Image (cartoon, rainbow, N blue to C red):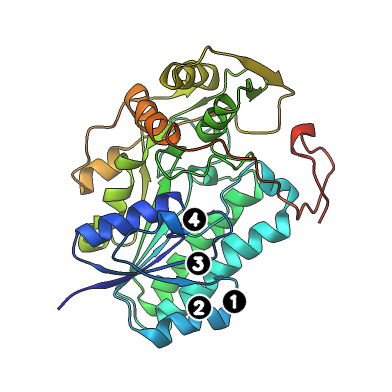
Amino acid sequence: MSETALVTGAAGFIGSHVAEHCLKLGIDVVATDNLSGGSLDNVPAGCEFVEGDLKSNSFVESLWNRQKFDYVYHLGAYAAEGLSHFIRAYNYRTNLLASVNLLNQAVNHEVKCFVFTSSIAVYGANQLPMDESMTPLPEDPYGISKYAFELDLRAAHQMFGLNYIIFRPHNVYGPRQNIADKYRNVIGIFMNQLLKGEPMTIFGDGKQTRAFSYIDDVAPLIARSPRNSKAYQETFNIGADTPHSVLELAHEVSAAMGKPTDVRHLEARNEVVDAYAKHDKIREVFDCPVPVSLKAGIREMARWVQNRPPSTPEEFCEIEIAKSMPESWKNVIG
């Protein structure tokens, strides 16, 4: 008997890749997205697509009225850590309350496993390398919303027996990423700026570090995970091991795009300076691929981007707090 999965955020970046790998595993996929940041072009052929917003409880209920799901892969989110300070209510509605709507139905309909993509944003600052045994201390509303839902999943397991798996990916990039989003995904931002003949903008001195993770190091493991009972009720960091500075990244991106390195420094913003994680735990439970190097991954993404036109940066028009917001982000107050 075939398995059926609901994949949220399936018109987005990571979600579309997870949906694609589920199909390759022979899992029937119902894909859903509100198309606020994703594109129908990203939804893999073979999925049944249902457009809707997880913030609507009636919409979430309607998904189960259509059919029963063995697995839920919850990747729908607005993952802008820095911007989340200025869109607090929107952040919690989108990343927490919408997730709870989904969790309620998963419990009521006895889903076999709920797979949740959290973030290393839950760790906060000065916990390096980030390890799953550490107590999370998130410093921005995005990380807080992710950690709150992690805790709720654990509570749902204890109360109702719902199986779950939590992944904490970090700085994932690759084909299908939204390069028009000026608030997140620095690699896409850099590539879009170069396509338009603009300098790459860096907040601060560019010495801040991240372990940038290619999509193929992440999506296949997430798709396979609910078939591995050893992963149930566990939390895993997932992604690349080696941190690189943003300045180093700018050089790699410009080389892959065949452009000179042209950088413009902006005022530093309030953000975690260094963020990279350990991945010993996930390697004990999964057969992990050898991580794609930054140079190879950037070149793969660049090939995809160069076959596309430049994108006009999308303005987020529901800003709730303008105080202390970076000048380059200020726009219409919603």
Please report the residue visible at 71 percent of the width from the left and 50 percent of the height from the top: 316
Q: Position of residue 85 (x, y in %)?
A: 71, 47
Mark closest to the chain's N terminus, 3 or 4: 4
Instruction: Find disc 4 in the rendering and name its residue.
Output: 39
Foreground: disc 3 or disc 1: 1
The N terminus: image quadrant: bottom left
What is the CA distance from the residue labelled 2 to the residue labelled 1?
Answer: 6 Å
Density class for disc 2 (Cα within 10 Å; few <14, some 14-19, many ≥20) is many
Circle 1: element type: loop
Circle 3: element type: helix
Residue at the limit of the structure toward the top, as seen here: 260
Mark closest to the chain's N terminus, 3 or 1: 1
Disc tally is: 4
Instruction: Find disc 1 in the rendering and name its residue.
Output: 56
**Left or right, 20 with reference to 154:** left
Q: Position of residue 125 (x, y in %)?
A: 58, 34
Please report the residue visible at 38 percent of the width from the left and 31 percent of the height from the top: 303
